[in-house]
Amino acid sequence: MIQQVRVLDAVTQTDQVNDVLVQGGQIQAIANPIPDWPAGAEVISGEGKVLIPGLVDLYSHSGEPGHEDRETLVSLLRAGRAGGFTRVGVLPTTEPPVDNPAMVEKLLSQRQALAAAEPNLPHLYPWGALTQAAQGQQMTELAELAPTPIVGFADGRALQNLLLTQRLLEYLQPLNRPVALWPCDTTLRGNGVARSGPAALIYGFVDDPVLSETAALAALLETIAAVGTPVHIMRLSTARGVELVRRAKAEGLPITASVSWMHLLFNSRNLESYDPNLRLAPPLGNPEDMVALMTGVKDGTLDAIAIDHRPHTYEDKTVGFPAAPPGAIGLDLAWSVLWDALVVTGLWEPLTLVQALSTNPARIWGQTPPTLQPQQPAEMMLFAPAQPWTVTPDSLESLSANTPWLGQTLKGQVLHTWVEPPRTLSPWGGAYSG
């Protein structure tokens, strides 16, 4: 029994204080007040707290298999739970990669074994590779992967062969599974590590032109228009990219799009610190890019925020900025940081953040989104916006600590995450939804 808690639900557009009664993994009642509840029920004070549907991460990276020193599967899922995530999507860029049914079986069997030993871990949703070893050269056996419990198809890397992209979309159309592509022309990007603009020039970085994103995006949009297969566009990072997506949606192209959470909080001016944890792919945009990305999420041009959690060891990142591998962790941190930076400051309405980090990601996957309604599974998290906590290697569930917030005190902490028990199991124990 959670008493007098602020209930936020983007599915029902609810933002009000209620009592919430949960029993047997299901929400039994939501009202203000609930006059009676079962004897012996645990009572939790919701004063000053927020109850939110479980968060859904579209895509992140696991260290396991292949780089368990960066992240194991259990540490990844614990990090997700600590940050309020109940569903975590994992890209196929492991070693070996998830490019065959046996690897899907292995990952989901491992998650099932972990959940048996430690209940309440988030559900794991692997992406199946589009190409062999996710290297962008030859397509995988798509028809063999499609019936497995993958959440969809993605390499997590940018495809460079437009003919291959076209053929992939043609083959994937009848399979009716989500497809995620990252528009980036690596020839135009070259060795660039910072977005072209005054900051890259002042700080002495090799620049990555806006054209590396927009040229690839324009070609991809033309291919989608010709083939007709729906596509999710990953990692939008420029104002021009947002405008191209906005125009394509207005023309009726079957696309959705997402932005990494870090690109909503930092821009190229922050590279003055030379912090290798701000070395990302795509690189941080210029200030006008960050504004356009924030506006794009608010007006629905960008459907979702992805965490793109990418763990690296201390040794990996303790190098000069250009030599650092791109990526930062985020599952433990993203909700708290985004709430404080965007909601507390009044830049966004709370339901905008809930929709972008819970409701829409689930819908992009073709799943029923988490929702706080009676007779629905209790897939949710309790958040204390005013509670401070300090980011240290010990306070993070992730094995890696490659984040610009290391050593800082954040305001707002997830207190508890409830994960919905799977209603339907795949042949290998992975949870299907929707």
Image (cartoon, rainbow, N blue to C red):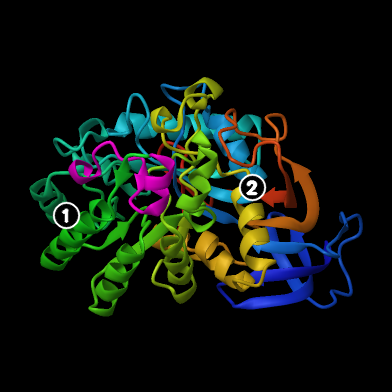
Q: Nearer the viewer, residue 258 or 5?
A: 258
The residue positioned 74% from the left and 73% from the top of the image is 30
Q: Amino acid at mark 1?
A: Leu
**Nearer to us in this view, 105 or 423:** 105
Residue at the spot x=23%, y=39% of the render?
190
Which residue in the protein does label 2 denote? 83
Q: Say if 116 sits above or below 208 in the image.
A: above
Q: Secondary structure at mark 2?
A: loop
Q: Would you say 231 lies left or right of 77 here?
A: left
**SS label for mark 1:** helix
Q: Is residue 394 left or right of residue 295?
A: right
Q: Quadrant of the N terminus?
A: bottom right
In which quarter of the view is residue 136 placed? Answer: top left
Q: Position of residue 197 (x, y in %)?
A: 36, 54
Residue type, label 2: Gly
Q: Residues within 10 Å of mark 1 (few under 14, many from 20)?
A: many
Front-lying residue, 296 or 207:
207
Residues rendered magenta in the picture: 186-204
Answer whether residue 415 is visible to the viewer in this image: no
Q: Nearer the viewer, mark 1 or mark 2?
A: 2
Whole-percent x, y for residue 398 in the image = 60, 33
To which residue does mark 1 refer?
Answer: 169
Q: Earlier in the sequence, mark 1 or mark 2?
A: 2
Vertical order, 289 against 81 (above or below):
below
Label ID, residue 106: none
